[in-house]
Amino acid sequence: MRIRDILRRKGDTVTTVRPEATVRQLLAVLAEHNIGAVVVSPDGAAIAGIVSERDVVRRLHDAGAGLLDRPVTDIMTTEVHTCGPGAEVEELRGTMTEHRFRHVPIVENGRLTGIVSIGDVVKSAIDELQSEREHLVGYIQGAP
Ligand code: AMP
């Protein structure tokens, strides 16, 4: 299965925040959309960074509540690992496991076109196992 198969099902909506957004505003966006990470982008297409709930928790511990009024650029990861819609889901699963992040923005022709989370990857694996199981059961029951 490829990344574009996941995007076909879940859609290509990516929640972004502008670089000047504060950490407080970021938290509102994470809560409102019930998500764990957002892409930081000036225009919704180019990627300036990625910031996840983990970044907030770690930095809050170091910096205290003053962090909430600082810009997200202070805590975002700027070296963002992305992949194209044609990549294999299995390959992406390996990358997420190896680098220990749970979100990968999808980029096509230099533009942000989706985001895949570890939850999406796990769901696609379960769906695949389920259809494989149904196929095998059908085969066994259909056998003379
Ligand atoms: P996550 O597991 O996605 O909540 O993120 C864990 C850490 O990895 C945080 O410091 C994120 O900013 C960072 N991170 C998340 N996704 C990516 C990515 N695709 N590329 C690089 N860093 C990432």
Image (cartoon, grey):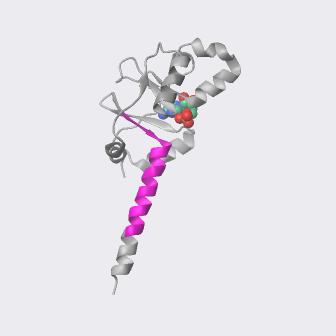
Q: Is residue 130 left or right of residue 101?
A: left
Membership of 127 in magenta stretch:
yes
Q: Residue at x 40, y 74 (%)?
A: 137
Q: Is residue 127 above or below residue 86?
A: below
Q: Is residue 135 above or below residue 70?
A: below
Q: Residue furthest front?
A: 32
Q: Residue at x 56, y 43 (%)?
A: 98
Count of numbered marks: 0
Q: Is residue 109 left or right of residue 100?
A: left
Q: Residue at x 50, y 43 (%)?
A: 118
Q: Position of residue 55 (x, y in %)?
A: 59, 27
Q: Position of residue 17 (x, y in %)?
A: 44, 21
Q: Position of residue 134 (x, y in %)?
A: 39, 68
Q: Name the image quarter holding residue 133.
A: bottom left
Q: Position of residue 4 (x, y in %)?
A: 33, 44
Split into 4 quadrants, where in the image is the C terminus? bottom left
Q: Residue at x 44, y 61 (%)?
A: 129
Membership of 84 in magenta stretch:
no
Q: Is residue 4 left or right of residue 79?
A: left
Q: Residue furthest bottom?
A: 144
Q: Is residue 130 above or below residue 10?
A: below
- The residues colored magenta run 114-134
* Residue 78 seen in render: no
* Residue 12 seen in render: yes
> Most prominent secondary structure in the magenta stretch?
helix
